[in-house]
Amino acid sequence: MIPAMAAKGSTIADIFRQRCPRCRLGKIFARSVFLGFPKMHQRCPVCQLRFEREPGYFLGAMYISYGLALVIITSFAAALWATTGWWITKATVGAVILFLPLAPATTYFSRVLWIYLDQTFDPDRS
Ligand SMILES: [Zn+2]
């Protein structure tokens, strides 16, 4: 058992803070994924949970990233279509352009979601 286990707070809040899914104290990234291209820690600085469990581990995060991107782009396209009256094709192209600055954050944030999902179903007990 890890001595520095935090009281389990809100999982949603810990996901958005990009905290380790096991101890909820250590940060997964050196700085927030919403602020550029952060470096990912190999292990949790507090409980030593290994974030990238095996080569190709983050392939699953790509599916999450794809789903997130789809939801964001669809929302942007719907908003553009409703407010500008553009054809849906033009609104979709505009939505993709609006989404581009969010792509790095979406990619890294999906890794956090993937780690939480994986640790929920197959926790690392080492
Ligand atoms: Zn930890």
Image: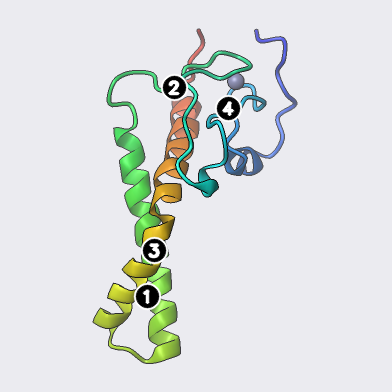
User: Looking at the image, which residue is at 72% across and 15% down?
Assistant: 4
Amino acid type, residue under disc 4 in the picture:
Cys
Dot 3 or dot 1, earlier in sequence: 1
Q: Nearer the viewer, mark 2 or mark 1?
A: 1
The quadrant in which residue 87 appears is bottom left
Residue ID for mark 2 = 122
Circle 1 residue: 77
The dot on residue 20 is: 4
Crowd tier of the residue under label 2, counting other residues whose Cα lies within 10 Å: few below 14, some 14–19, many 20 or above = few
Using the image as rendered, state which of residue 68 and residue 26 is in the foreground: 26
Seen from this angle, which residue lies furthest bottom? 85
Question: Which badge, 2 or 3, is on the more N-terminal residue?
Answer: 3
Pointer 4 with pointer 1, Cβ within 8 A: no
Residue 83, given in percent of the width and then of the height, sits at 45, 88
Closest to the camera, between mark 4 and mark 2, is 4
Residue 97: image location, x then y, percent: 34, 68
Cα separation between marks 3 and 4: 27 Å
Between disc 4 and disc 2, whose residue precedes? 4
Taking the spot 40% from the left edge, 78% from the top edge, the residue there is: 78
Q: Secondary structure at mark 3?
A: helix
Q: Give the class, few, some or many, for how many residues have Cα within 10 Å of label 1's Cα (few <14, many ≥20).
A: many
Q: Are marks 2 and 1 in contact (CB under 8 Å)?
A: no
Q: CA distance from mark 4 to mark 2?
A: 15 Å
* Residue lying at 39% horizontally and 19% vertically, measured from the top left: 53
Name the quadrant where ligand 1 sits: top right
Task: Where is residue 109? Give x, y as percent.
Answer: 47, 43
First along the sequence among labels 2 and 1: 1
Mark 3 vs mark 1: give the one in front.
Answer: 3
Q: Amino acid at mark 1?
A: Ala
Whether the residue carrying mark 4 lies under 8 Å from ligand 1 is answered with yes
Which residue corresponds to mark 3? 99
